Image (cartoon, grey):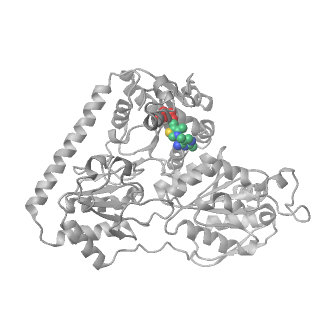
Amino acid sequence: METTQPITVEVETVGQAYLELLRARGIKYFFGNSGTDFGPIIDGLARFAAENRTHPMPITVPHEFVAVSMAQGYAMITGEPQVVMVHVIVGTGNASAAVMNASRLNVPMIFSAGRTPLTEEGLRGSRSNFIHWGQESFDQGGLLREFTRWDYELRNGDQLEAVVDRALEMALGNPQGPVYLTLPREVLAQKMDSITIHPFRKNKEEALQPSAETIKRTADVLRGAVNPLIITGRLGSDPTAVSAMVSFAEALAAPVVAPASPFVSFPNTHDFHLGVSSAPFIKDADVIVVVESDVPWYPVQGKPGENAKVIQIARDPNYGAIPIRNFPKDISIGGDPKLALELLAQELKSQKRNEKSLIERAERIRSQHKKYRERLKQRAGQASGERPIDTAWLSACVDQVRDKDTLIVNDHGVSQEYLSLSEPATYFGGSPAGGLGWGIGGGLGMKLARPEKTVIASCGDGTYMFNNPTACHFVSQAYDLPMLTIVCNNAVWHSSKAATQQVLPDGWAASTGKFPLCELSPSPRYEMVVAAHGGYGEMVDDPQQLLPALKRALKVVKEERRQAVLNVICGTH
Ligand SMILES: Cc1ncc(C[n+]2csc(CCOP(=O)(O)OP(=O)(O)O)c2C)c(N)n1
């Protein structure tokens, strides 16, 4: 319900007024993990239910990390700001890694928490439980200040609209991200007769485009390139930007690599896509265009030549949230990257160029792409008989069973390279913050937003446990959100083990073969966990049984509307 005229709504408490305001601002869901601070919110939602007000619809999420991850997944696929509420400082603590993920991924969200009652007596909602003393903190907003765009405490009901609208404005600002709103119990419990809600006049800022002079100067540099390279990362968080990237790459006749990209930022089926690592190309490139990529290359592995020109295009080309990031910027273009790419493509096409050399360059890239994709195909084929199952084969099988309506969520599971990602917004990887365990929650959020889609989340076995699987499977069953989870089970935190080998190749761990704090055996029967939630579970250790098992599990998800888990016994990857 978007208001065009002020409306006055009868309420009984500030808590009810808050919910009315969220409803008026178009908030569809209220992801919550409640506690003693929630009374007026619980009561307000009960009134909504009794009076058939369907939104915001409460979603009970039994772990805060999952609640925020669900909100993240919902926002990743819709772009709409979400609302989460958790229990005071302790709920905030449980949610914090997920808020860090959302922050580094620029996910718009009002992350809120109760504030322990401020008063020891005298007001409705004053302290009534021993935790109300121990749960007070000097600076609750400070807990997550580095990872939130704004934080504030609601101090009285009169200010409610101003506070909520400011919260939304900041969450949808530039860059977008979570904000933190704390809600003291007495304030939520305050009596209030009505709230007047005005039209929302905090619209998102208009897309900014670079000046004509900047475009011309940049295009001049690009035109002079003999061996250009495009590196992209998060561009595809705006799915409409992907076609602009395609036009730009084609106009420039440049290869595109997408290291650690959590979105489809450039179709990997496109002739110019050359993989997920810039390392093989970085030294020879003379002009490098970095588009929304936190880490375009690892300086320890190799850097561009001294004379190479680096052009950085991003909403925030300084990546101001990251304390140290010293990639060069010979030209720095802020604003909306989609507009910059469109303008650059137009400008490149508008002037006469040496068409012959461009055609030759494009041909060279095409043949590199062909070889690259063939190598992957061969690798997956060779792995198809391996036991334990190779992740290359697993990923290739997942690629075979997906259709155009499948969303792949990757939480340290399948290898992105083996999927044929031709469409934007079909693949979602983790945040640059790297907080593992968001994937199943994220997938549930996507399923909530897009019930018509098939959602497949994949994760390692360690990562499955980081997901708080019981909480995830509970939500899936309770809210009819069936999805498939694939556990790539190698019975180890391989990443920690591999990192030890890399840093200390001749160290004790590498030479004794013992890696304390990495082993995850005996490996539990992960597929049995979901059975407790009415789901379908299966263990797969035979590579030839993988495709049939995936098909069986997807049939259960789609036709029986039950969640499913495949526990795939994998080798290291
Ligand atoms: C919340 C969180 N805790 C710990 C880590 C550190 N970490 C990165 S990868 C990894 C191992 C994950 O294990 P698994 O899912 O089994 O995948 P594998 O590394 O074996 O492929 C760990 C513990 C992290 N990134 N996030």
Q: Is residue 561 visible?
A: no
Residue shown at the point (55%, 75%) measured from the top left:
202
- Quick check: 445 left or right of 294? right
- Report how many numbered discs are placed on residues in the image: 0
In the rendered image, which quarter contains the C terminus?
Answer: top left
In the rendered image, which quarter contains the N terminus?
Answer: bottom right
Residue 130 image position (x, y, % from top left): 87, 50
Identity of the residue furthest to the right in this view = 122
Relative to the observer, which residue lies in front, 226 or 283? 283
Residue 26 image position (x, y, % from top left): 57, 64
**Which of the 4 image quadrants contains residue 288?**
bottom left
Relative to the observer, which residue lies in front, 296 or 568? 296
Residue shown at the point (39%, 65%) measured from the top left:
314
Residue 184 image position (x, y, % from top left): 77, 62
- Quick check: 74 left or right of 206? right
Residue shown at the point (58%, 73%) measured from the top left:
3
Residue 93 image position (x, y, % from top left): 67, 50
Compared to residue 472, the image places residue 190 above or below, namely below
- Quick check: 122 left or right of 30? right
Residue shown at the point (61%, 67%) measured from the top left:
150
- Quick check: 200 left or right of 93? left
**Which of the 4 image quadrants contains residue 370?**
top left
Compared to residue 257, the image places residue 162 above or below, namely below
Q: Is residue 516 visible?
A: yes
